[in-house]
Image: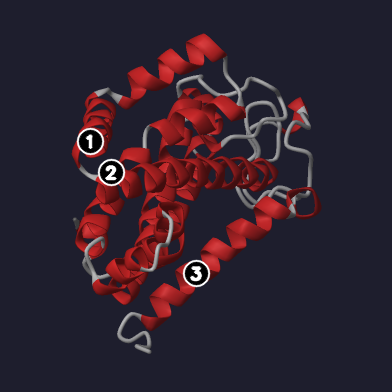
Amino acid sequence: MRALRGADWLVRAFIVVILVFVVCAVFAPLIAPYQPDAQNIRMRLLPPLSAGHWLGTDQLGRDILSRIVFGARVSMKIGALAVALASFVGVTLGLLAGYFGKRADDIISWLVNVQLSVPFILLAISVVAVLGPSETNLVIVLALGSWASYARVIRSKTLSLRNREHIEAARALGSRTGRILVLHLLPNMLSAIVVLSSFEFAKTVIAEAALSFLGLAPSSPRYSSWGIMLAEGKDYLAAGWWVATVPGLTIMLLVLATNVVGDWSRDRFDPRGTRQ
């Protein structure tokens, strides 16, 4: 097993950062000092390091640290669900396209090309306009925007593996197609799926923040999204730069940590597969 070298400390530091975000997402009510929607106009626009408000307050006197902590729950949950849905759809279609080839490959490849040709923002606005803004619809939109990446990678890997000796042996022994796909092909692709999911998760966090910034997220006062915080804070950059800067830096930190760890995991587990 190859151990981490060189940037050992950097990867470990970013793994800790990701774990901190996960803990915040899971235990947000226990960690946050205030409720995310608790307003106090007398305490509005307090700068960072103010008494009782480490990261300051926003234009309504809400504690920014508490909103950041609860925002981690939103971003991590939506990101994880969207990646899980996209990977399930993309991996399934990629396996079918690569294993069966011919018409199945043509149809699925055509669907991939159609999805990649549709601007993501247009797709998101269309879906939310029809179904309405909600977390479920955000997950669906984000999954629709990323499943094609899984399908292309898994199709490529399936094409390279479907005629290997162990697959031919399974066919000769009378194994059913489903058994071959799930027990013989899929295990050889788990490292590629994990690595690709790490990069897609980072992209999903940015996309969720962008959609929330554009007003495509739920409008509940308790919905503490980092994108909504950015949208609300953009009008107060002169009076309270921290209102928008803190959530922006939080998004950057989570995405950077995920990309660094994903880059390391790709080099360690799947140095060629996810580059196809």
259 with respect to 45 (left or right): left
**Disc on res. 109:** 1
**Residue at horizontal 25%, vertical 30%?**
107
Name the residue tied to disc 3. Answer: 15
127 with respect to 58 (left or right): left
Which of pointers 2 and 1 lies earlier in the amino acid sequence?
A: 2
Q: Is residue 204 above or below residue 195?
A: above
69 with respect to 216 (left or right): right
Which of pointers 2 and 3 lies earlier in the amino acid sequence?
A: 3
Name the residue tied to disc 2. Answer: 97
Instruction: Write down the quadrant of residue 243 in the picture.
Output: top right
13, 26: nearer the viewer? 26
Amino acid type indicated by mark 2: Ala
Helix, strand or loop status at disc 1: helix
> Residues at badges 2 and 1 in contact (C-beta under 8 Å)?
yes
State the residue lying farthest toward the top.
130
* Coloration mode: secondary structure
Amino acid type indicated by mark 1: Ser
Q: Within 10 angstroms of label 1, few (less than 14), some, or many (20 or more) residues? A: many
> Residues at badges 3 and 1 in contact (C-beta under 8 Å)?
no
